[in-house]
Amino acid sequence: MAPPEDSVRADTWIWCVRLVKTRAQATEACRAGHVRLNGERIKPAHLVRAGDEIRIRLAGRERIVVITKVLRKRVGAPVAAECFVDHSPPVLRDPTPTVAVRDRGAGRPTKRDRRVLERLRDQPRPPGPL
């Protein structure tokens, strides 16, 4: 049974519009339950159509897109951007990174100063773009 002309596999579409780098990553995201179609978890072979809402969670960020055009083959980034409407929340970034400041000529740091500096350096960084 051939799929209808106006639908395509979910993992293929996610890869075609460049939400992930490889088709294998799209398939794995579907299998792991990180992809939802209209609120329901889907398998990689689930068919998607124009008007469907896809939520995909990758790298600690959720992308929410509404399909406007169905693609079967991977296309360039400008064309891919026209195939969906992005409703994802904006990425929040800390505008000023934490930087250790010492007065010039203050000499060698004490043991306490060094430990404070090490704690600042070991802080986790905010997630960057995909």
Image (cartoon, grey):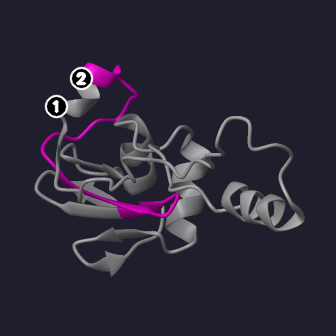
Disc 2 secondary structure class: helix
Give the magenta range. Answer: 56-78
Amino acid at dot 1: Glu
Q: Mark 1 points at which residue?
A: 82
* Residue 33 pos. (x, y %): 50, 75
What residue lies at 57% left-to-right and 39% top-to-bottom?
A: 22
Is residue 64 highlighted in magenta? Answer: yes
Left or right placement of residue 106 versus residue 18 in this view? right
- On screen, 18 above or below 74? below
Work out which quarter of the rendered image holds the N terminus and state it: bottom left
Is residue 88 highlighted in magenta? Answer: no
* Residue 37 pos. (x, y %): 29, 69
- On screen, 75 above or below 71? above
Q: Toward which corner of the image does residue 65 lie, by quadrant?
A: bottom left
* Viewer-nearest residue: 13 or 94: 94
Total numbered circles: 2
Q: Toward which corner of the image does residue 32 lie, by quadrant?
A: bottom right
Disc 1 secondary structure class: loop
- On screen, 17 above or below 95? above
Cβ atoms under marks 2 and 1 closer than 8 Å? yes
Q: Name the residue under label 2.
A: 79
